[in-house]
Image (cartoon, helix red, strand yellow):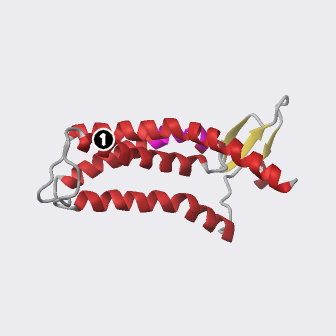
């Protein structure tokens, strides 16, 4: 089918190579069908989405603390390193979640979506800190957060590549 034309409320299609028009059958349309919710889809969501949500909640909780305990190191640059590492792991989890889908389009844009979600969350986290007594929002912190997300998203596929072949080899040996 080449294109759809609307005639008096009925969708008509022109078939390839002909000038014949006919009404569209229900099977002609390629609808994106939602998969029914199954135990495996719930397990999949729990396994991939769960860690992202728990880690995002942890970031939110840490951002809502007015003061950190006295045992936190206070050397120069610790805050920057802490922000970077916190969001590095968040970027890895986001990337893991977005790469775990079976949909090609989502996998194709997983890196971009990881950067976008991570950067927006970093900005919203800094905005949230502006309301916490004893804390302030910092654009520099948000930039280091975003850098951590980008680095995490960029290194996650490399981490996966370096760890998966070893797992496959050990499974083959165990199966032989």
Q: Quadrant of residue 66?
A: bottom left
The part of the chain drawn in magenta is 107-114
Task: Name the residue nearer the viewer: 15 or 87.
Answer: 87
- Kindly identify the residue that appears in the image at 52 percent across and 59 percent down: 49
Q: Determine the secondary structure under disc 1.
A: helix
Horizontally, residue 171 falls left or right of residue 112, namely right
| Residue 7, percent from left and from top | 68, 44
Q: Quadrant of residue 140?
A: top left
Residue 111 counted in the magenta span? yes
Horizontally, residue 155 falls left or right of residue 118, namely right
Kindly identify which residue carries mark 1.
Answer: 81
Q: Is residue 105 visible?
A: no
- Kindly identify the residue that appears in the image at 44 percent across and 60 percent down: 53
Task: Name the residue nearer the viewer: 176 or 61.
Answer: 176
| Residue 75, percent from left and from top | 20, 42
User: Seen from this angle, which residue lies furthest top?
Assistant: 17
User: Seen from this angle, which residue lies furthest right?
Assistant: 176
């Amino acid at each position: 089918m080449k294109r759809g034309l609307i005639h008096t409320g009925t969708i008509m299609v022109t078939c390839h190579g002909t000038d014949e028009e006919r009404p569209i059958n229900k099977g002609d349309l390629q609808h994106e069908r939602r998969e029914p919710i199954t135990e495996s889809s719930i397990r999949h969501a729990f396994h991939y989405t769960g860690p992202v949500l728990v880690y995002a909640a942890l970031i939110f909780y840490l951002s809502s603390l007015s003061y950190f305990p006295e045992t936190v190191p206070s050397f120069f640059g610790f805050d920057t390193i802490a922000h970077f590492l916190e969001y590095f792991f968040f970027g890895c989890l986001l990337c893991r979640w977005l790469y775990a889908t079976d949909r090609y389009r989502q996998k194709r844009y997983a890196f971009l979506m990881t950067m976008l979600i991570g950067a927006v969350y970093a900005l919203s986290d800094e905005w949230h800190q502006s309301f916490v007594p004893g804390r302030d929002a910092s654009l520099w912190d948000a930039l280091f957060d975003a850098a951590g997300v980008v680095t995490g998203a960029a290194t996650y596929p490399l981490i996966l590549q370096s760890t998966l072949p070893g797992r496959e080899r050990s499974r083959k040996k165990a199966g032989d």
